[in-house]
Amino acid sequence: MKQWLANLDPRERRWLLGGAVLLLILLVYSLAWHPFSKEVRRLEELVAEQRALAAWMEQAAREAQRLRGLRARAGNPRAGRSLLALADQTARQDGLGSAIKRVEPEGQSKVRIRLEGAGFDDLVTWLEKLQVQHGVRILSITIDRRDTPGLVDARLTLAEGGT
């Protein structure tokens, strides 16, 4: 091989050496640099996604803390009152008094309620208040619309102790 290289014209040797250097550069680029830079871009995108997820999780954690604080400040406002009495009283306070058709206990810690012709917005607001301020869970709910817009019939079962 050395003999063959030595027998070449100096101009041919330069061309051959230049081609070998160019081939070496192309090999280094295609086998090392390009895959490396491609992986760096992929990892940078992954880091950006993870940062966005972390920011969302931090916001969700702050919201959960805020809601826990609201619940803690509310304390146990129904101390000494049964779930039956709480549901009846709060429904009347929230404008659902005329819609209440039946409130009956179901065991020690559950109550079934039937409402007819209740305002949908009032119903939703009342249920949110029961959950957030009083820690009441909604076990089941069936809502049927009426012919009058905004009014519904509802059957629901509530239980003590929300999570």
Image (tube, rainbow, N blue to C red):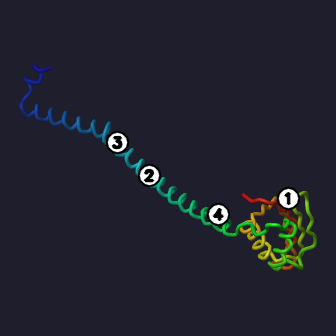
Taking the image as shown, residue 4 lies to the left or right of residue 137, namely left
Q: Which residue is mark 4?
A: 68
Foreground residue, 55 or 162? Answer: 162
Q: Earlier in the sequence, mark 4 or mark 3?
A: 3
Of labels 3 and 2, the one closer to you: 2
Q: How far apart are the alpha carbons under marks 3 and 2?
A: 16 Å
Q: Earlier in the sequence, mark 1 or mark 3?
A: 3
**121 to 17, vertically: above or below:** below
Instruction: Kindly state the secondary structure of the residue where label 4 is placed.
Output: helix
Of labels 2 and 1, the one closer to you: 1
Image quarter of the N terminus: top left
Mark 4 Cα shell of 10 Å, populated few (<14), some (14-19), many (≥20): few
* Residue at 60% from the left image edge and 66% from the top image edge: 66
Foreground residue, 122 or 64? Answer: 64
Q: Which residue is mark 2?
A: 47
Q: Is residue 149 visible?
A: no
Q: Earlier in the sequence, mark 4 or mark 1?
A: 4
Image quarter of the C terminus: bottom right
Q: Which residue is mark 3?
A: 36
Q: Which residue is mark 1?
A: 109
Instruction: Kindly state the secondary structure of the residue where label 2 is placed.
Output: helix
Q: Amino acid at mark 3?
A: Phe
Task: Give me the disc on residue 133.
Answer: none
